[in-house]
Every structure is written in C-alpha cells, then in structure tokens.
C-alpha cells in the first residue's frame, strides 16, 4: 500500500496492522530515520533491546537472502513482538523481499530504510502494490509544511516565534529533518525559560552556522558568478557533511524561485513586486543579491540551468567515473562562469 504524505506521520506512530513490512525512502535521510524510529517504537519501547530489535545489513541479505525470512520469523527470548530493521536498501533486495511478503511467517514488523527511489524502482513498486506492506516517501519539507513543523516543534518547548524569525527559520531550515530538529532543539535551549518568543536575533544567532546556511551561500554565490565565494561555500558544505545531491537540490530550489519571479517580470510585473510575491519570502538579507540576479537571468536561461542541475543530480546518482562532489562542483562553477560571460556581454 502507498501511504499519502498527509498520512505518513500518523501511520508511523500507529501503523496499519495489515502492514508486516514498511519501506521508508526519499532524499531526506533524517526524516526516513525519524519515521523508522517512530514505527519501531510503536512495537518496542526500548529500541536498544537486543532481544526484540534486530538489525540486518543489506549486504548480509544479498549474501544470504534466506536470512531475511529467518530473522522475520524469529521469536523473542523475552516475549513480545519483534522489530527487524534493514538499512540502505536498494532494488538489489527486491527478490528477497518479494519472497518474504509472499510467504510471511512470524509476527515481526520489518522496517526498511532506503535512499531516493524513482517511481520505476522495483523495490518501491513491490511495497506499494502489496496488501501486507506499505511504502512511505520522505521528501524534503518546504513552505507551509516546513512552517507547521517548526511551529509544532517550538510549541512543544512552549515557544512561539516572531514573523521575521519564522521567515528566517523557514528560509534556512528544511534540508534534512534531523538537522532541522537539531537546530530547533538548540534554539530552544538557547532561549531558555526566561523568554517564550523567538526573535530574529535569536534565530540568526543560533541557526547562523547551520548546514542550511551553507547551502544558501552555495546557491547565492553560484548565481552571482562569485567563483571564489562559491569554492569556499562548497568546502563549508563538505565540512558539514552535506552530500552533493543536497547541494544541487538547494541550487535547483534557488533557480526555481528565480525562474518563477523572472516569468512574472517577463509578463510585465515590476521586479520588486515579483520578488515579494514569492513564498516563502526572500530573506531580507538576501534581497539585494536576489534582485541583482533577477535582473541578470531570464526565464529561458533559468530553464536551461534547471535542466543542467537536474542532469548533474542524475550523474551524481550514477556509477560514473567522476565522484559526485566533482560533478556537483563542476555544474555550479559552470553557472558562475556563465554569469561572468553574461556580465561581459551586458
């Protein structure tokens, strides 16, 4: 069964009893892990219990496919239902899972974590079509969805946020659920018990060196044609352990927002009005740079850039000769060089 996005968190907290195995996949690794943990806790309170929680490596299943069914059928020595966790799953495990779902023995809940799986993925199709399994996509949160998560997390600490602080948080978080939650927990600790409201200064002071800001710097510097700052921003993203696909996704989001505003300008709307129409709004400290880039880039060129970035992402996921970081860096440096060429012509 395929679980809709608006049901995902509720399903993870209280899964359908018919689902004997659940696949969680998508680019947001933090959200995949968070939902997997929530699923596991719906069965076992202590995830460190070695008698009721088993971890099975994807490589071990490939070497011995029968181990998956054996682990799922095993009984706990201390009683109670077991959880079997499989991480880093790929399409290469489709056949063992097909056999498991067709001949499921035992009461265990099998929780499978994977990276991004395309719609034609065999493993994804298997879980979406099976009556005794479920598939949950975990995509990067943005816009209203991200704002709700930030508000709910702050509310759990009895905190609210000013409008400009919320704008900043929405603009600079959301790359990864684990990173976002960690930054908000840090912010709550920073605020302490003396105040009940997060101000913009609080948000900047606490989230100012987050992974999201590193991605922001990458996108802004690439589309501004600032190769030196771009190189520094890429190095910083690497030090934050941000993978190449996440970097390219950030550049794609920036290009999409520029394209949306540029299309409005091409239709006769003033540039300032077009930029202010974007949601979430452009962060006030980035408005000058965004306006300059909006004057430089037209809708047609931005559409071409988006195609290049999507192609670079696909090459990062392939098993080519060039490492993913090199593919990412090359694509972004090409954008920066294009800006310089545009500047010389204009």
Image (cartoon, rainbow, N blue to C red):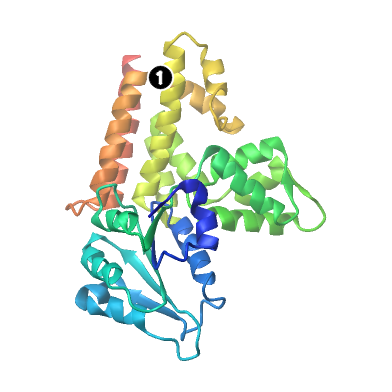
Figure check: 116 above or below 301: below
- Foreground of the two, 308 or 15: 15
Q: Quadrant of residue 342?
A: top left
Q: Is residue 340 shown to the viewer in this render?
A: no
Q: Where residue 219 sits in the image (x, y, percent)?
A: 43, 37
Task: Give the residue drawn at x 37%, y 36%.
Answer: 227
Give coordinates of residue 156: x percent, y percent. 70, 56
Q: Nearer the viewer, residue 144 or 81?
A: 81
Q: Is residue 267 left or right of residue 46?
A: left
Residue 190, can we see it?
A: yes
| In this view, 312 is above or below 9 | above
Helix, strand or loop at mark 1 = helix
Q: Say which quarter of the image contains residue 223.
A: top left
Across the whole image, how many numbered discs are drawn on residues?
1
> In the depicted view, which residue is nearer to us: 297 or 157?
157
Circle 1: is it few (<14), some (14-19), or many (20+) Cα within 10 Å?
Answer: some
Q: Residue furthest bottom?
A: 77
Residue drawn at x 57%, y 76% is: 45
Looking at this view, name the residue that lies furthest to the left.
321
**Mark 1 sits on what residue?**
296
Quadrant for residue 67, please give it: bottom left
Q: Which residue is at the front of the view, 282 or 236? A: 282
In the rendered view, does 57 fall on the left or right side of 173?
left
Residue 217: x and y in percent read: 47, 40
> Where is residue 288 drawn, in percent x and y?
54, 25
Is 216 placed above or below 60 here?
above
Quarter of the picture containing the C terminus is top left
């Amino acid at each position: 069964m395929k679980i809709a996005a608006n049901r995902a968190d509720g399903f993870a907290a209280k899964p359908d009893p018919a689902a004997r195995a659940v696949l969680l996949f998508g680019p947001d690794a933090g959200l995949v892990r968070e939902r997997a943990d929530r699923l596991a806790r719906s069965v076992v309170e202590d995830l460190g219990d070695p008698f009721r929680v088993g971890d099975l490596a994807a490589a071990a299943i490939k070497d011995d496919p029968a181990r998956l069914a054996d682990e799922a059928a095993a009984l706990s020595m201390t009683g109670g239902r077991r959880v079997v966790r499989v991480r880093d799953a790929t399409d290469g495990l489709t056949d063992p899972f097909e056999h498991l779902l067709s001949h499921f023995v035992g009461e265990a809940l099998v929780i499978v974590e994977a990276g991004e799986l395309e719609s034609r993925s065999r493993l994804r199709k298997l879980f979406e079509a099976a009556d005794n399994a479920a598939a949950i996509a975990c995509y990067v949160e943005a816009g209203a969805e991200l704002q709700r998560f930030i508000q709910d997390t702050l509310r759990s600490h009895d905190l609210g946020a000013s409008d400009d602080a919320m704008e900043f948080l929405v603009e600079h978080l959301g790359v990864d659920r684990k990173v976002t939650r960690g930054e908000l927990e840090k912010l709550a600790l920073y605020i302490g018990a003396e105040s009940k409201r997060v101000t913009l200064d609080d948000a900047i002071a606490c989230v100012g060196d987050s992974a999201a800001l590193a991605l922001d710097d990458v996108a802004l510097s690439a589309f501004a044609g600032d190769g030196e700052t771009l190189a520094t921003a890429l190095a910083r993203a690497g030090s934050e352990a941000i993978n190449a696909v996440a970097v390219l996704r950030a550049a794609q989001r920036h290009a999409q927002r520029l394209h949306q505003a540029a299309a409005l300008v091409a239709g006769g709307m003033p540039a300032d009005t077009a930029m202010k129409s974007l949601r979430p709004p452009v962060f006030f400290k980035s408005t000058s740079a965004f306006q300059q880039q909006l004057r430089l880039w037209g809708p047609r060129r931005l559409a071409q850039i988006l195609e290049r970035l999507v192609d670079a992402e696909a090459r990062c996921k392939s098993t080519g000769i060039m490492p993913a970081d090199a593919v990412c860096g090359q694509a972004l440096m090409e954008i920066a060089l294009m800006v310089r060429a545009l500047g010389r012509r204009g």
